[in-house]
Amino acid sequence: MNPMLRHWLVNALVVYEYWVIFYLFALSTIYFILVVVGFFEMVRHRLTRRDAEENSVLEASALVSPVSVLAPAYNEEATIRESVRALLMLSYPQFEVIVINDGSKDATLKLLIEEFHLYRSARYYESTLPAKPVRAVYESMDPIPLIVVDKENGGKADALNAGINVARYPLVCAVDSDSLLEPDALLRVARPFLEDPKRVLAVGGIVRVANGCATAAGRVLSVDLPRSWIARFQVVEYLRSFLGGRVAFSAFNCLLVISGAFGLFSKAAVLAVGGYRTSTVGEDMELIVRLHHWARRRRRDYRIVFQPDPVCWTQVPESLKILKRQRNRWQRGTLETFWLHRSMIGRPRFGILGLFAFPYFILFEGLGPAVELTGYLLTIVGFCLHLFDWPVALTFFLATMLYGMVLSVGSVVLEELSTSRYPHVRNMLLLVAAGILENLGFRQLLTVWRAQAFWDLLRGKKHWGVMERQGFGRPVPKAEVAKKEVAGRV
């Protein structure tokens, strides 16, 4: 190789590698700050929660608005009965459960009709939001607040719009039909609407991994870790996402994501912005950002809140094939949302949202996979071609590994200090191990998939991808159910 060309390549690679290291250091510093802010917010929340719980929960609950719980379902025969039973057992003074069968090809609708004794209803509703045609609306002959909407397939966002059209109550709660809510989750997530009804537009709650937990009658009876390391890695991811970043972003009113698995919204606000956007695969994040956009443009005093208390238990993929589809979709949805609302970036009129939250998500969530992946590839290429010595490559890899491990283990510690859902020492040790091991291959694999999502987005890919359901793990024999406490007491 020409000496001058070699010298130029070496310098360029070294500069880029150190820039990537600086990038990762900046990310870890910001995330460390978010975790610290999240920790103090969790402490403050727990102290105020204790004071609030000295009062009668029922006395407070009588003041909250009624809620329509929306559960879109597509080919959910493995979990639909247990999920609906869990929703019907929620502790809340007045609510209705609306299951939207989005053109399922399996026995989802049949199982619902048989299990809950459904009949065709003449329920009146207005099609305020656009959605695929509704074939029929069902209600139960039993004294339960269950409505099932059978419609043509249009995707999750379309199904939620149909559910909002049918909903009769001023608050709508979007949940995944393959998830389980703790009995008091709805009451807790509604608390911000009770305390600040004029300003609160949406509230999100913690989502936890149900794989490995013992379940019966639609409830989580005891909490345990999944046996699969793939699922354990995702437990750490969920802790890092919900207890770190979202608590801190909520404190500054710049929360950009409320999980599609569990979120409570003002129906009036959702109707005002036109409901869920059906042209994106990231409809949950896009709706939250659109609510921000809508409120900021109107200079409205508002809040979008993350509640650390409510717990929704959801299945996570245990196969790499399904996990790849999920992460690809999440990344495409994130990038689509950034593009749709790019006018907010760096704009002072959008406050901390436009000056910090949006740039943070774009630089580190949107472009992060590309930066990290090119860093890995160029390090390997430079090392193989002897363009620089091993200390440079080792420095890069150690920096990325250490950064990930510190954040992961820190999230596990924050979980123990805040909610203690995994109280056994064995579980905490396994979570710490998962927080370390996920950085030795799993995280790099996710980086590749997320980078691939960018390419898929450029090619115009809109497909959601099939999510196979496996049913909730570790069912408890009926004889033991009475001996166990429900998840809210675990």
Image (spheres, rainbow, N blue to C red):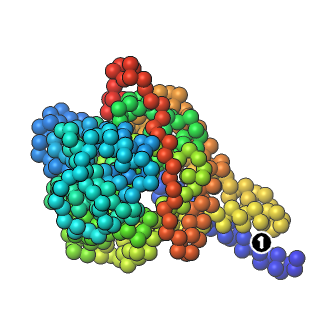
Q: Residue 297 appears in which quarter of the rendering?
A: bottom left
**Quarter of the image with the C terminus in it:** top left
State whether residue 231 appears in this view. yes
> Quick one: 370 or 114, which is closer to the camera?
114
Tell me the amino acid under the disc marked 1: Val
Residue 265 vs residue 472: left or right?
A: left
Q: Which residue is mark 1?
A: 10
Q: Where residue 27 sits: x, y (%)?
A: 52, 60
Looking at the rendered image, the quarter that the N terminus falls into is bottom right
Vertical position of residue 102 compared to residue 41: above or below? below
Q: Quadrant of residue 416?
A: top left
Q: Nearer the viewer, residue 103 or 487?
A: 103
Above or below residue 396? Residue 350 is below
Q: Position of residue 406 (x, y in %)?
A: 55, 47
Q: How many labels were placed on the picture? A: 1
Q: Nearer the viewer, residue 8 or 286?
A: 286
Percent coordinates x, y for residue 240 in the rendering:
47, 48
Can residue 411 be seen here? no
Q: Is residue 8 left or right of residue 286?
A: right
Instruction: Give 350 or 192, whichever is nearer the viewer.
Output: 192
Is 70 rendered above or below residue 140? below
Q: Residue at x 68, y 55 (%)?
A: 397
Tell me which residue sits at (35%, 69%) in the image: 277
Q: Relative to 11, is 262 above or below?
A: above
How packed is label 1: few (under 14 Cα within 10 Å), some, or many (20 or more)?
some
Q: Residue at x 32, y 38 (%)?
A: 115
